[in-house]
């Protein structure tokens, strides 16, 4: 998976876990920071779980053949900032 957008300082765990169950894909997206408090994907807000000092999200993915635009909110700066990112998947990343 490829992450584009932001300042280039943010990183995600790669490869990220992408699973499929009954045709529904779920992405487990883990940032390199605990400072991401929510993500908006397809108009739905997902709240972070903090694991080992990193923000983690489980997001349903409708179509892994198309790039996914998300908005991630970071509280690492003096005030929260919503930053736009694009995730691009490799079909080989899906696990059945």
Image (spheres, grey):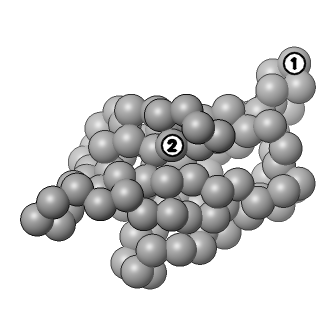
The answer to whether residue 19 is above or below residue 75 is above
In the picture, residue 82 is in which quadrant? Answer: bottom left
Q: Earlier in the sequence, mark 2 or mark 1?
A: 1
Q: Position of residue 60 (x, y in %)?
A: 67, 33
The answer to whether residue 19 is above or below residue 67 is above
Q: Nearer the viewer, residue 95 or 35?
A: 35
- Which residue is outermost to the bottom? 8
Q: Residues within 10 Å of mark 2 (few under 14, many from 20)?
A: some
The alpha-carbon separation of the residues under discs 2 and 1 comes to: 24 Å
Q: Position of residue 11 (x, y in %)?
A: 45, 68
Q: Residue at x 76, y 60 (%)?
A: 67
Across the whole image, how many numbered discs are drawn on residues?
A: 2
Q: In this rendering, does residue 50 appear at all?
A: yes
User: Seen in the image, is 94 located left or right of residue 77?
Assistant: right
Q: Secondary structure at mark 2?
A: strand
- Which residue is outermost to the top? 22
| Residue picked out by circle 1 | 22
Q: Position of residue 9 (x, y in %)?
A: 37, 78
User: Seen in the image, is 93 located left or right of residue 2?
Assistant: right
Q: Residue at x 45, y 74 (%)?
A: 6
Task: Indicate the quadrant containing the N terminus: top left, top right, bottom left or bottom right.
Answer: bottom right
User: Seen in the image, is 34 located left or right of residue 62?
Assistant: left
- Which residue is outermost to the front? 43
Q: Position of residue 65 (x, y in %)?
A: 88, 54
Q: Secondary structure at mark 1?
A: loop
Q: Which label belongs to residue 40?
A: 2
In the picture, residue 91 is in which quadrant? Answer: bottom right
The answer to whether residue 10 is above or below residue 81 is below
Q: Nearer the viewer, mark 2 or mark 1?
A: 2
2 and 1 marks in contact (CB < 8 Å): no
């Amino acid at each position: 998976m490829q992450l584009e957008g932001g300042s280039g300082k943010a990183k995600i765990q790669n490869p990220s876990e992408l699973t499929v169950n009954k045709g529904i894909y779920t992405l487990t997206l883990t940032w390199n920071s605990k400072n991401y408090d929510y993500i908006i994907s397809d108009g739905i807000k997902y709240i972070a779980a903090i694991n080992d000092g990193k923000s983690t999200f489980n997001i349903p993915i409708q179509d892994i053949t198309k790039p996914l635009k998300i908005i991630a909110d970071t509280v690492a700066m003096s005030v929260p900032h919503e930053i736009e990112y694009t995730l691009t998947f490799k079909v080989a990343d899906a696990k059945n």
